[in-house]
Image (cartoon, rainbow, N blue to C red):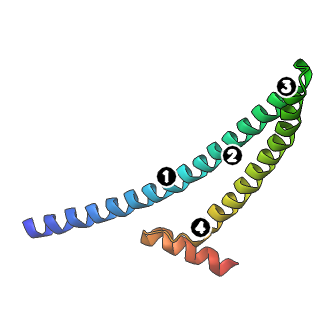
Amino acid sequence: MEAEEKNAIKQELKIKEKINLEIRDYLAIERTKFANERTFLAYIRTAMTLVLAGFSLTQFFENDIYKLAGVIFIPMGILAGFYGLRRFLGKKKEIAGSMQAYTPTSQVHAAVAKAETRKK
């Protein structure tokens, strides 16, 4: 009886371990998505700062050096914003591709995924 109980406990632990792995994998993907969004927001914040600094320098200072710096900062900010957007969308697509390639570890999820691919 003890051997049967040990085997039952081992089976139960294996099932819980697989579930924990799936949760860990899912959360890792979510963390990656959030990191991508945080990086995009940092690019936008930097772009806005450059553009606002450029406008401030051109509007509030009479010296030509400050106006030149302002004129340079404005396009730099716009370029930084577009670069951040391009990078964000590229990484988002890459993350989505990784999710498509992800294979569930449990037998139940594998069976569901297999049934869904048969329907398509």
Cα–Cα gap, marks 3 and 2:
26 Å
Across and down, in percent, residue 104 comes to 49, 68
**Marking on residue 98:** 4
Q: Taking the image as drawn, is residue 27 in sight?
A: yes
Tell me the quadrant of the picture where the N terminus can be found. Answer: bottom left
Q: Please, what is the three-letter code of the amino acid marked with disc 1?
A: Leu
Nearer to us of marks 3 and 2 is 3
Nearer to us of marks 4 and 3 is 3
* Residue 70 lies in quadrant: top right
114 vs 8, left or right, is right
120 vs 30, left or right, is right
Across and down, in percent, residue 103 comes to 51, 71
Cα–Cα gap, marks 3 and 1:
45 Å
Which residue matches tag 1?
27
Across and down, in percent, residue 85 comes to 76, 51
In percent of the image, x 70 and y 43: which residue is there? 43
